[in-house]
Image: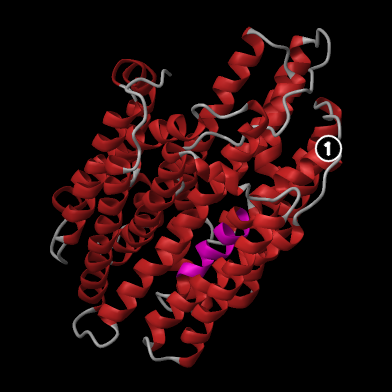
Amino acid sequence: MSAPSSPSAPSTTADTPPDSPHPARLGSALLVIVTAYMMVGVDSTVVNVALPDIQRGLGFSRTGLSWVLNAYTLAFGGLLLLGGRVGDVVGRRRTLGAGALLFALSSLLGGVAAEGGWLLAARALQGVGAALIAPSTLALITTNFPQGPRRHRALSVYSSMAGIGGSAGLVLGGMLTSWASWRWALLINVPIGIALFVALPRFVAETPRHAGRFDVAGALTGTAGMTSLVYAFIRVSEEGWTDTQSLLGFGCAVALLFGFALIESRAGQPIMPLGLFGDRDRAGGYLTIMLLPAGMFGAFYFLTLICQQVLEYSPLRAGFAFLPMTLAMFTMVRLLPRLLARLGAKPLLLTGITLLVVAGGWLWRLRPGDGYVTGLLGPLLLLGVGVGLSFMPLNATILARIEPREAGAASGLLQTLQWLGGTLGLAVLVTVYGTVTRHASGTPAEILTHGASRAFGIGSLVAVAALLVAGFVITGPRRHGA
């Protein structure tokens, strides 16, 4: 499940909305745009609850199953900045329409997948579609809604969609998997994507195009490097640290990521402007926002498996099991603007991360006999409050004192690091799980709980690292304002 973050800002602010648009047309435009954004948010979690059924249906191992999530998040996070540049050059509405159509097609391919490799390829294509959709949605609001109350209301609705989508995805995934099949967790996107493609030119005005170049080499080397690194970690979880393919994967990852850094330092229009790391607070914020999901994505992955394979919940009940966390998160998000103005970003950030550390430590003590109330409810509430307190102050820290011309790149990089951090963190925690359980004995529930508890412990240590960065690297003024 993705944590709430500021949506990617448009990379240009010069575009102007149409003059005096009809309110009914504005309502239709907002419905189309937020539906596209919510589709991406739902898909980030809708498959989670279906994972045990996918594992049984297509024969994934417990460690290999993580690729069902990683294939999507790697393509999405790795190509997000390139998707934003495509929107600048060819038009945001056209880019969003192409992304929605690709998302629908890849969802269809995934829904009818007959074997694991087929499903993973479809999930990667979904990530490409999401990378075209997400950066264009906010720009289309700024160009379709006039400045003032109408735009403010539209932005308020839009900003709530990511969290609502992620939470709804857990429940929707449980409903579809319980009442029909895990395949409908993917097939549900087909009619929605096609409807968006048809509705966009009718209700949403196109943005002006801007000259620019695509940093394809940077996007490909960065995404390939992260993919190689994730592959190497997951391979280690199955074969051990002396495996030749694992070592080769780590070597390729180092070479590709070094090449990516070299390309970005020399590119005229880099996909990741390295100058954004020049500010100490912003650099610390970027590192923190990469570390936090690194511990959280793995926690959600293993909690889903524990709910269904240890507590023996149905997919629907497992989806509802996450609702206390969601409610706690939404409560904090609603309170945060006032708290942020009164206390400043850093105290809230440190409090939120501390709660995440405690939640991970609590889950580290999980045992097979623990029930939902005694073993999971407390950590889920702490996760909800911790996430709610952490991410908005991080956004405020990263985007403070940013030049307007760099706002789009800074916000896009924020989302990219968040997704890639979560993907890499999941791979590391799966590696911990595989290493711990490779020669373990006991019932399947005992083995799963034992390995997952160790993974939760490592996730807690990752949160400790984030706490140290936030405490000693980020200096920030006491009050950023809401």
| Quarter containing the C terminus | top left
Left or right, 244 with reference to 370: right
Would you place residue 336 above or below residue 469 in this image? Answer: above
Q: Is residue 405 visible?
A: yes
Q: Amino acid at mark 1?
A: Gly
Would you place residue 34 above or below residue 341 in this image? Answer: below
Q: Residue at x 25, y 72 (%)?
A: 451
Q: Which residue is mark 1?
A: 91
What segment is highlighted magenta in the picture? 66-76
In this view, the residue in front, 232 or 274, is 274
Q: Is residue 139 magenta?
A: no
Q: Majority secondary structure of the magenta segment?
A: helix
Locate residue 21: give its quadrant. top right
Left or right, 12 with reference to 211: left
User: Measured from the top left, where is residue 230 in percent x and y?
Assistant: 49, 70
Q: Residue at x 51, y 31 (%)?
A: 399
In this view, the residue in front, 453 or 389, is 389
Left or right, 50 with reference to 471: right
User: Measured from the top left, where is residue 386 in percent x and y?
Assistant: 29, 39
Locate residue 171: give its quadrant. top left
Would you place residue 470 above or below residue 34 in this image? Answer: below
Q: Is residue 194 visible?
A: no
User: Measured from the top left, where is residue 306 in percent x and y?
Assistant: 29, 62
Q: How many marks?
A: 1
